[in-house]
Image: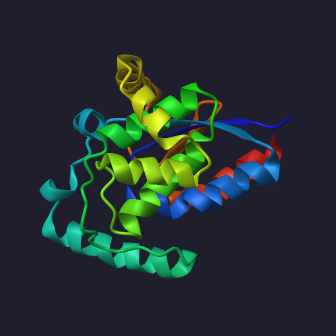
Amino acid sequence: MALHVDYYMTLNSPWTYLGGRRFEAMLAKYGATATIKPVDYGKIFPQSGGLPLPKRAPQRQAYRLVELARWRDFTGEPLTLQPKFWPAKDELARNMVIAARSQGNNAIKLAHALMRAVWAEEKDISDPATVDAIAQGCGLDGHGLRQAAADPAHAAAYEADTQEALERGVFGAPSYVVDGEIFWGQDRLDFLDRRLAKG
């Protein structure tokens, strides 16, 4: 029996971006389903012992760049270590992802395209024309989706998903949750692969 993955993430995470295509391929490989859930790590970190990047020790910040370069080279994913529009102002974009999810569209594909725009293409995902074009490139009605994203229900879903993540023990991005079991980080995708293989 195929499994379901709850996919907790943020568009601002380079690690989520680096694992994006591999995660999509894994879902297809096993016929698994997934629900993407952008969440607020600004609320999750203080309750889980995490620190936002600017508050981390200089050694950790420096090593993060080393690891990003290693993973970029290993995965072959294009990635700018210090992109022009990062941290991204992602409220509009994340609400479009949630709107796409609520409409039954491919919200995961959209989210990964938005992350690619930030991390590989130096694009500003707070710009309406930019996000419209990205959504169009995913086969979606960009303008219509952006209008739908203004519905307060999507902001409420973001808050509810953040609370859900906290209650389930999620503390970092990306987190893949299968039957209550958390796989944190794109570097745990091999473990997720084995879990999905079990069914």
Residue 142, percent across and down?
A: 49, 42
Q: Residue at x 30, y 57 (%)?
A: 124
Nearest to the observer: residue 13 or residue 181: 13
Say above or below: 110 vs 3. below
Q: Is residue 17 visible?
A: yes
Which residue is rendered at x = 32% and y = 74% of the image? Answer: 81
- Quadrant of the frame with the N terminus: top right
97 vs 186: above or below: above
Residue 26: percent from left, percent from top: 71, 55
Query: Which of the 4 quarters of the picture holds residue 36?
Result: top right
Q: In this rendering, is residue 137 above or below 18?
A: above
Residue at x 36%, y 61% (from the top left corner): 118
Q: Quadrant of residue 160?
A: top left
Of residues 66 and 115, the one nearer the viewer is 115
Q: Position of residue 102 (x, y in %)?
A: 56, 25
Q: Quadrant of the C terminus?
A: top right
Q: Is 199 on the left-hand or right-hand side of 156?
A: right
Identify the colour scheme used. rainbow
In front of the other: 115 or 105: 105
Position in image of residue 141 (x %, y %): 54, 40
What is the count of numbered marks? 0
Residue 186 is left or right of residue 117, and the answer is right
